[in-house]
Image (cartoon, rainbow, N blue to C red):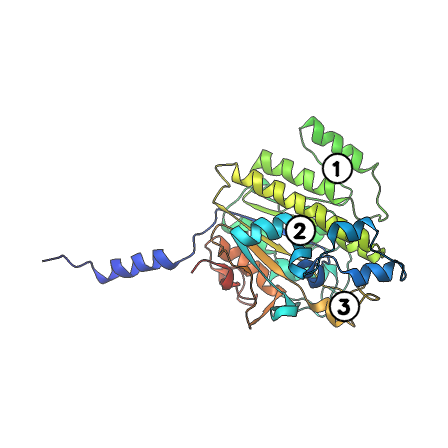
Amino acid sequence: MTPRLPLLVILVFGMLLTCPAASRNVILVTLDGVRCQEMFGGFQADVWRAQKDGEAIEDTELYKNFSAESPEERREKLLPFFWGTLMKEHGAIIGDRFNGSVMKLSNRHRFSYPGYSEILTGRSNDREIDSNSKIFNPRTTVLEWLQDDLKLAPNKVAAFASWDAMDYVVMKQPGAFFSNAGYEADPSADPAVAELSRQQFQTLTPWDSVRHDFYTFRFAMDFLKTHRPRVLYLSLGETDDWAHEKRYDRVIEAMHQSDGYFRELWDWLQSQDDYRDQTTILFATDHGRGDDPLNWTSHNDKLEGAAYVWMAAAGTGIRKRGNLTPTAEFSENQIAATLVHALGLNSEDYSKEAGKPVELFFVQ
């Protein structure tokens, strides 16, 4: 007679088979103000033509490098690693509003601090956060909560950002964890990185508060290699600032450059025993922009297009599903909970008021 397994053992075994694998590490990457149009459709010729004031664009390098017949071809030219490797082999993305996948802001302001706060706290806060002023976040961010819940040292959680206000956005308690944003010296002991830290002050941008993403990424990679954080936030900002300068060419080039950063980050993670197959990466944006070739540079509470955003996930526990087009509508306020869920933790322990995890991402 075959012995019967106790019912409890069977139930537990079944749960182990169906529950997603929990990550040991999470990385959040944001690209400031990247529209769904470019994220899912790549280079937009009508915008470039409008910037060139109706001139022929077919002979421009931007058109030659990034134009193609279909949205799928254009987006893979623009973000070859993201679309060609991450989304095909390791992850999924939502927010393709032109194909039925809708993700929107819950905050009404539709600019950066409210958007980043919504990402990092899982809730809108329209009353207390109604500007980009440098005030520490009124609410405990998910980064701070993870540090406390996982009992992590201050250097095991880190944030690197191109925009200087992010030092304030990412935390409620000043100095809770390591943060480096804007034109801020990097304390690395590596002589090469120390030299880059010096050079950032001599490589000026058109903006007083935003350094080039190149420096932000290099400092983040150095910290990752040196301190091995379990929670890392990388906030890249040039895409938004070039848009405000009405430089569509620079927006496209900045996105393409960021794709190279994604490749370098991913390849390094896969080469490390403490990160390979133990890390989930989430990608998102803080707000959208205007929908047409004349208002694409702007974002505010009057422009409906600025409410539309997107989110992607790749790595441990994430289903390999590419561009998802579910009928459900998603919200930016679900990103914090998704970050918590990726670590195998209960998002309601962080906040019962935050949006729910995007469970569609995770292996079932």
Question: Quick one: SS at disc 2?
Answer: loop
To which residue does mark 1 refer?
Answer: 185
Residue type highlighted by circle 2:
Leu
Residue type highlighted by circle 3:
Asp
As displayed, is residue 41 above or below residue 154?
below
- Real-space Cα distance between discs 1 and 2? 30 Å
Closer-to-camera residue (333/249): 249
Instruction: Please tell me which residue is depicted at 76% across the width and 45% down the height of the picture.
Output: 182
To which residue does mark 2 refer?
Answer: 79
**Tag 1 and tag 3, C-beta contact below 8 Å:** no
The percent coordinates of residue 140 (x first, y second) are: 61, 57
61 sits to left or right of 262: right
Residue density around tag 1, few if under 14, some if 14–19, many if 20 or more, within 10 Å: some
Residue density around tag 3, few if under 14, some if 14–19, many if 20 or more, within 10 Å: many
The percent coordinates of residue 283 (x first, y second) are: 61, 54
Instruction: Please tell me which residue is depicted at 54% across the width and 60% down the height of the picture.
Output: 337
Residue type highlighted by circle 1:
Ala
Of badges 1 and 3, the one in the foreground is 3
Question: Quick one: SS at disc 3?
Answer: loop
**Tag 1 and tag 2, C-beta contact below 8 Å:** no
